[in-house]
Image (spheres, helix red, strand yellow):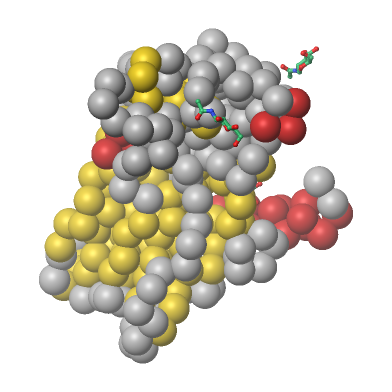
Amino acid sequence: MTTVKLVTLVLMIHVLISVCSGQYNRCCGRLTQKQGVIQSPNYPGPFETPVFCEWVIQAPPKLKIVLYLTQYYLKGFFHVYEFDHYTNKDEWIGEQKLATVNCEDEIWTIVSYKPFVVLRFAVQEMGNIHLRVLDHLMDVYGFNITYEMVSKHEVNNKWTCSAFDCSYLGNCYASADYSEYKCHCFPNFSGEECEYGPHCNPMTEKNMCQNNGSCRYIYGDHVNICQCVPGYLGSKCEQKINGIHPSG
Ligand SMILES: *[C@@H]1O[C@H](CO)[C@@H](O)[C@H](O)[C@H]1NC(C)=O
Ligand SMILES: *[C@@H]1O[C@H](CO)[C@@H](O)[C@H](O)[C@H]1NC(C)=O
Ligand SMILES: *[C@@H]1O[C@H](CO)[C@@H](O)[C@H](O)[C@H]1NC(C)=O
């Protein structure tokens, strides 16, 4: 970690602490900057339970708020609301629930046109609520996600990535200025989506698929799949379909 990053991090933590009241243990804040990171306590390690966090993102009138679930490993427990006005839990106007996010639903972007987005993260006890990445090798708890405020007229959302886009074999990180998102693959995995690894890699000519099928990892290090060329079938493209010409 560079000194600049470290200083930014320390400043960020300081800002979060200084706006948090007693009931939230460090995981809260009112975010008014155009972009930022929101993280579960002790990410990527386990957080202490019970935990209750609340972040309020506040946008000026002409901007919408976009959340990118870049690193999100929870099966629920994370709720997103929008408001016309929000002071605190007891003082607000126009509440609308946008989502309860479950990593299995594969929702990776949430957009709000209202000026206040409130994120609540509440877990009573640690059960089977997190996801295991890089099968058998690494457990990740909670989330480390980003948000930005952009013009309401902007039509397309920025391309960002997620654990799913990185085949659960890498981390999706924003660049320092949040302009770009990329998969940073775990050791021994590569490719834009971390889709290549020890048993499937065009660079080393490792391919478990037959008949010119192309391989890739899809959901951790144990699941690789074959995409067959027309005319072939089977988990390894080992089967020729009768009557269909391979180039058809
Ligand atoms: C959290 O996300 C930010 C933005 O993508 C990234 O720069 C940072 O390295 C992440 N932190 C961890 C611990 O993964
Ligand atoms: C990467 O692959 C090499 C060669 O197979 C192996 O020795 C090494 O332990 C692997 N690294 C990780 C982090 O799995
Ligand atoms: C696989 O590709 C090579 C080179 O393009 C080609 O010569 C060969 O016939 C192909 N095999 C099959 C089974 O399609």
Residue 200 lies left or right of residue 168; in this view the side is right
Residue 68 percent location from the top left of the image: 44, 56
Foreground pick, 171 / 214: 214
**Quadrant in the picture for residue 129:** top left
Residue 109 lies, with reference to residue 112, above or below; the image says: above
Foreground pick, 211 / 3: 211
User: Is residue 243 among the parts visible in the rendering?
Assistant: yes
**Quadrant in the picture for residue 81:** bottom left
Residue 173 percent location from the top left of the image: 61, 50
Please name the residue shown 48% across and 62% down the image: 159
User: Is residue 123 among the parts visible in the rendering?
Assistant: no
Residue 69 percent location from the top left of the image: 43, 49
Residue 64 lies left or right of residue 207; in this view the side is left
Question: Within the displayed image, which quadrant is ligand 3 positioned in?
Answer: top right
The residue furthest right is 3
The residue furthest top is 136
Please name the residue shown 44% across and 78% down the image: 150
Please name the residue shown 52% across and 74% down the image: 34
Which quarter of the rendered picture does the C terminus lie within? top left
Please name the residue shown 53% across and 73% down the image: 33
Residue 192 lies, with reference to residue 146, above or below; the image says: above
Residue 49 lies, with reference to residue 87, above or below; the image says: above
Foreground pick, 16 / 204: 204
Residue 154 percent location from the top left of the image: 39, 82
Residue 130 lies left or right of residue 203; in this view the side is left
Residue 237 lies, with reference to residue 174, above or below; the image says: above
Count of numbered tags: 0
